[in-house]
Image (spheres, rainbow, N blue to C red):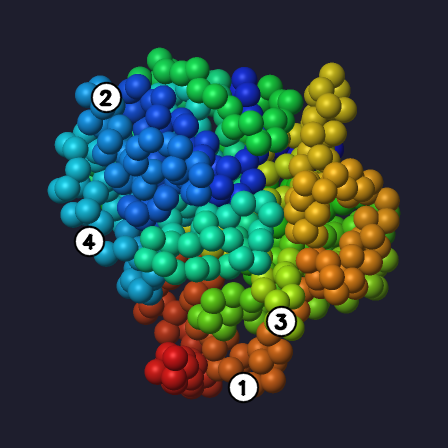
Amino acid sequence: MTILKPGLNCMGIYETRETGLIVDACDYYRAFYQTALRAKNYLLMAGWQFDSEVSLLRGEEAKEAGGEVRFLNFLEELCQKNPELEIYILAWDFSAVFSLEREWFQNIIFNWSTSERLHFRFDSVHAAGATHHQKFIVADGAIAYVGGMDICSSRWDDRRHLKENPDRVDLDGTRYGCYHDIQSYHTGPVVKVLIDLFVQRWMDSGGEALQIPTANGGPFPLPPEAFAIPAERVAVSRTQMPHLQSERQEIKEIRHLFVDAITSAESLIYLESQYFSSRAIYWSLIARMSLPDRPRLQIIMMLPDRLPLTEELFLGLPQLKMIRSLQLAAEKTGHTLSVYSSAQLDQGNRKMTFIHSKLLIIDDRFLTIGSANATNRSMGLDTELNVSWEADNPEQQGELVAAIRRVRASLLAEHAGLYGSGEEQSFENVENLTRNLDCLADDHEARLCRYQADPNLEKSDWPDALEPIAQVVDPEKPVDNEFFFERLSKSELGSFAKGIFKLSQLIIGL
């Protein structure tokens, strides 16, 4: 069953020459650094967050670089060395909710103190309650990177995910925990599609029309640590909601993509996501497991089992309810559904590797990666961008399936703390995969562990009080405050007010 359908779950399927995946920010930041060094004409960067002081290289690599490695200073140095280089950075104009987590006065930092050929814009033109969440970069029309990674603080880590890593520290000395993410790279005609997406978003945000050459740069070195995917075509899918200030149309290609992919599964569904709260994905899994004439599935999820406080309150509970419901459905229908996290014991405490990746693999024949989480927002409200590969060509099917299988095996080995051990191949076999992962999860010395939700989610009176707010935090449609309050019953209004009171107590008590 073919999954990719242009015009429905992707905007199109495009030719590519080299394509693949980069795992974790150590390798991605290095790849971006090397690409930017060689850019002759332009760099286009769209993201949810950028921080000016992020070090792209760490440790010995930074010492050997012989120049600036901090993000903004590095870009400024490139402009000084190359008078032909133009750099465009488009960042989501974040809401006040994130103000304590963001670098302030970025318009001044990026625009007033740098070269006139470094152009920075905040993009606030989106549907009510939405965010611009796409993360992609294009250099000289020759190479592009698409995925879930931001170039910002507290994201850098390598695939070892060491308990203590002297390079996993921000410039202010702040140490942070292990962090996992995935990006993709592409060359060839698909890059032109991404250029057009960037140019349109730049203009929609209020920027001038850009005249961007399609391809006159390169060649760029491909990341040596990357997973090359032997595919000649890659699909591009989006989420986009209309806004009165732009001509955007409603696009839910990623939602359709996840639903179609899940319902087509014959043996294995493997999902990595920062969150799991999407009703569309939940009901797709329920529907697929409920079909009596289809093969039994192994459904494997990798999630962080602890979220930042506010996210834990508003997303943790729906996530917990959905997971328990899915596990019950799997038991009744004969499928296997297992949810794991990755953590290390440190003096009796679990130190988690935070899963920030957004990846879905179906039967080792389909893989999608991008910015879209398994949330309602990503399926219908926020601006998202995914790329996908499908083994639908008989001539390349075996080679592409083998490559996707190697990706999955390597990711599982990484989560189990076995990256680089030579044991990656042991995760390739689909038969009894869940049973083997359960054995690892039962080994207290292994990093792979069963997902353990915060027990306080169900032991307090927070859930009922906060659930109405959760509907606003993770909606699939634009948020209209008047519409929302008009349709709440008196009891729901009371619960909403109680939720606000509880939240204020928590914040004051921090």
Label of residue 472 in the image? none
Relative image position of residue 429 (x, y in whole percent)? 82, 40
Foreground tag (3 vs 2): 3
Amino acid on which the number 1 mark rests in the picture: Asp
Which residue is drawn at the image coordinates 55% and 21% (left, top)? 18
Q: Residues within 10 Å of mark 2 (few under 14, many from 20)?
A: few
Which residue lies under the disc numbered 4? 105
Mark 2 to mark 4 CA distance (whole Å): 27 Å
Q: CA distance from mark 4 to mark 3?
A: 40 Å
The circle on residue 461 is 1
Q: Are marks 1 and 2 in contact (CB under 8 Å)?
A: no
Residue 118 quadrant: top left
Q: Amino acid at mark 2?
A: Asn
SS for dot 4: loop
Q: Secondary structure at mark 3?
A: loop
Q: For the N terminus, which image quadrant?
A: top right
Where residue 334 appears, as percent x and y from the top left, is: 86, 57
> Where is mark 2, residue-wise?
82
Position of 16 with respect to 429 (left or right) is: left
Q: Nearer the viewer, mark 1 or mark 3?
A: 3
Q: Secondary structure at mark 1?
A: loop
Residue under circle 3? Answer: 347
